[in-house]
Amino acid sequence: MAFTYEFTQESKELLQKFLECDSPSGCESEATHFFADTVKSCCDEMRRDAMGNVTAILNPGSDVRTMISAHADEVGLQITSVTAEGMLRFRPVGGIDPASLCGQQVRILSSRGGKIEGVVARNRALANFDQHGNATVKTSEMWIDTGGKNREEVLQQIEIGDWAVWGSETLFLSDNVIKAKALDNKVGLFILSEAMRSLARHRPAQGIYAVATVQEEIGLRGMAVVAQAIKPRTGLVVDMAHATDIPGGDAACSGELSLGKGVALTRNADNTPELASILRKTADRNGIPYQITVGRNPTGGTDASRLQLFGGDTMVADISVPCRHMHTPTECCDIRDIVSAIELLVSAILDPAK
Ligand SMILES: [Zn+2]
C-alpha cells in the first residue's frame, strides 16, 4: 500500500519547534540537539562528530547504507566589533542580500547566556545613491542596536564573535503557505524527522543514516566530513530550492518551480540519473506531485554535490521543497510540497520503483 503522510496539528507543532531553533552556520547545536531529541526514540544508534553533524541510525549493522540528510544551519550574522556608542558591527554568515537586513529585528545568541534582541539600522543621512536616485545598501554601513548605552554596557551582555539570526515570527499567510525565517532548512530537518519516524515503524532491512549536517551555507562543509565517515551507497539530500513564481523569477535560467505544485526533483550533474529515475517513477506510481527543475547551476548549491564527491561512489539525488524569498526573514513554502517530499522520501526507500 502506498505510504501517505497527513500534516496534522501535531506536525504543525513539530515544524514550529524546529523553526524556533536558532542555528546560524558554525553555531548549530540548538537545531542538531532538537533533531536528535526528536528521533532518538525511533533509532538504534546516534552519533555526533567533532564538527557537529548528528546522525541517527536504523540497522547500523547492515552493509547497505542509505543516507538521508538535511542541513541544520541557517544564514545569519556574526558580531565583529562594538562602537563607542554601543552599536554592534557585524558580518553576514552565508549568502544574505544586504537589502533584506535593514530595518529588521534580530536576535543575538549571547555566549554570556540568553538571547538579546536588537534591530539592524543605518544612518540615512549617509546613504549613497545610484544614478537612478535609489539608495544603495551595504552591510558595512549597518549596525545592530540592542538599546545599550555604550560599548562597556553592551559588552557585558554579548561577546565579539557571537552569532545573530533574524527575529521574524512564523505565521501562515494562507491555508497552505507558511512564512518564517530559516525555512531553509528547518523544513528539511522536519521532513527528515518525520521520514525517520515512519521508516522506523516499517523497519527496512538496509541501514538508514539520517544526518543533520552543519555549515552547509558556508561551503557545504559538514557533509564533506560525514560523507567520508558513512560512505553510503545511496544519498537523498533534502533542502529548499528557489521558487521562480515571483516577479522576475528566472525560469529561463533555472527552470520553472512554483509553490504548491509538488516536491522538486533536480536534473543536474549532482543528481545521479539512475536514482533520479527511481524517484520519478516512484512519484508517478504513488501519485505524488513533483516538478522537474534544473537548479540554479549545473552543479553545487546543496550538500548533494559534496556527498557525490566525498561519499566514495554514492548515488545522489536532491529532494527539494520550493521556497520563495530564500535567505530572507520572510521565506515562504507550501505545506503541500512538504507533504510530497516526506511521501517521496519514505516511498523511495521502502518501495522504490525501478
Ligand atoms: Zn538550504
Image: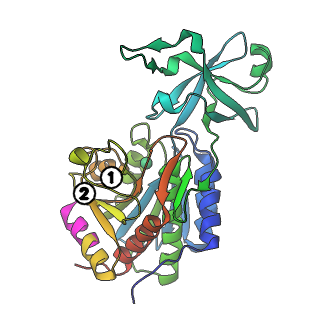
Could you tell me which secondary element the residue under label 2 belongs to? loop
The stretch in magenta equals 272-279
Q: Position of residue 103 (x, y in %)?
A: 60, 29
Q: Residue at x 49, y 46 (%)?
A: 214
Q: Is tag 2's residue or tag 1's residue first in the polypeptide sequence?
A: 2
Confirm or reject: label 2 Cβ below 8 Å from ligand 1: no
Q: Position of residue 301 (x, y in %)?
A: 33, 44
Residue 5 seen in the figure: yes
CB-based contact (under 8 Å), mark 2 and mark 1: yes
Main secondary-structure element of the magenta-colored stretch:
helix
Q: Position of residue 44 (x, y in %)?
A: 55, 71
Type of amino acid under label 2: Asn
Residue 315 seen in the figure: no
Residue under label 2: 271
Q: Is residue 21 left or right of residue 194?
A: right
Q: Residue furthest bottom?
A: 1
Work out whether 66 lies above or below 217. below
Q: Is residue 62 left or right of residue 119?
A: left
Work out whether 218 lies above or below 49. above
Q: Position of residue 326 (x, y in %)?
A: 44, 44
Q: Residue furthest front?
A: 133
Could you tell me which secondary element the residue under label 1 belongs to? helix
